[in-house]
Amino acid sequence: AQSVTQPDIHITVSEGASLELRCNYSYGATPYLFWYVQSPGQGLQLLLKYFSGDTLVQGIKGFEAEFKRSQSSFNLRKPSVHWSDAAEYFCAVGVHTGGFKTIFGAGTRLFVKA
Amino acid sequence: DGGITQSPKYLFRKEGQNVTLSCEQNLNHDAMYWYRQDPGQGLRLIYYSQIVNDFQKGDIAEGYSVSREKKESFPLTVTSAQKNPTAFYLCASRTTSATQETQYFGPGTRLLVL
């Protein structure tokens, strides 16, 4: 069965420090991979996506993610975190089973300290 | 402005009452989705629809019903059979064009039980 694991429930980083959020997926075929961000009480905003091609993808707000097939990972990175980045981050995999569905990880909440 | 609207932002349900959550999109997307979000559990798929007049159950459809009479609209009814309806409900839509496997989300409706 397809699944997405985000091993860190929450992470705290200092403003200006680098960030890496981990994501591992389980899917037999080539995956569609996504990172979304959610501010409290809001919907989800797409940060970036990987479908094929270059395994390092750039997204909005200075985020990037790298697809590593051998590790079944799609980790999200940012070189310098801003206080406004504090939010919940969801990794997701898109699958074609009885129609297209997106399976989400449980999320990682990012706290940013001054 | 194209987008997805959900109403109301907050909804209160009494015991034994059915309530309906609205989701409208003007993105001309074919597919629409309903998710339930509970703290620490990520998003779980309730129902999805790939085309007008057709919809499929997701992972947690019990106690919910939907209709898809128009391309723009995908209302979700939370019935009295759903014993634990308190959650944040998110609607999403997606075009079914090739290489556009990205879901876009509405702002959400928070349902509370009185």
Image (cartoon, grey):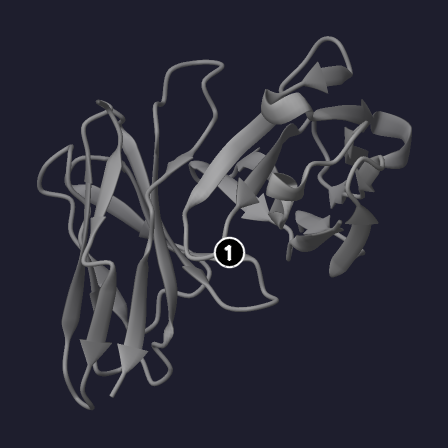
Up the image or down, B96 lies above or below B7; here it is above
Q: Quadrant of residue B45?
A: bottom left
Q: Is residue B100 left or right of residue B32?
A: right
Residue A78 vs B109, above or below: the answer is above
Say what secondary structure mark 1 lies in: strand
Residue at the disc numbered 1: B43
Give residue A1's position: percent from left, percent from top.
Answer: 67, 51
Q: Residue furthest left?
A: B69
Quarter of the image for the N terminus of chain B: give it.
top left
Looking at the rendered structure, the number of numbered marks drawn on it comes to 1
Q: Quadrant of residue A79?
A: top right
Q: What x and y, as percent, mark residue A43?
A: 41, 46
Q: Residue at x 64, y 57 (%)?
A: A106
Pinpoint residue B78: horizontal percent, then vertical percent: 23, 70
Q: Residue furthest top?
A: A53
The amino acid on which the numbered mark 1 sits, given as a three-letter code, is Leu
Q: Is residue A42 left or right of residue B112?
A: right
Q: Residue furthest front?
A: A114
Q: Nearer the viewer, residue B87 or A113?
A: A113
Q: Is residue B79 visible from the viewing direction of this image?
A: no
Relative to B29, residue A37 above or below: below
**Split into 4 quadrants, where in the image is the C terminus of chain B?**
bottom left
Q: Give left or right: position of A37 versus B70.
A: right
Q: Residues within 10 Å of mark 1 (few under 14, many from 20)?
A: many
- Is residue A13 depicted above or below A71 in this figure? below
**What chain does badge 1 belong to?**
B
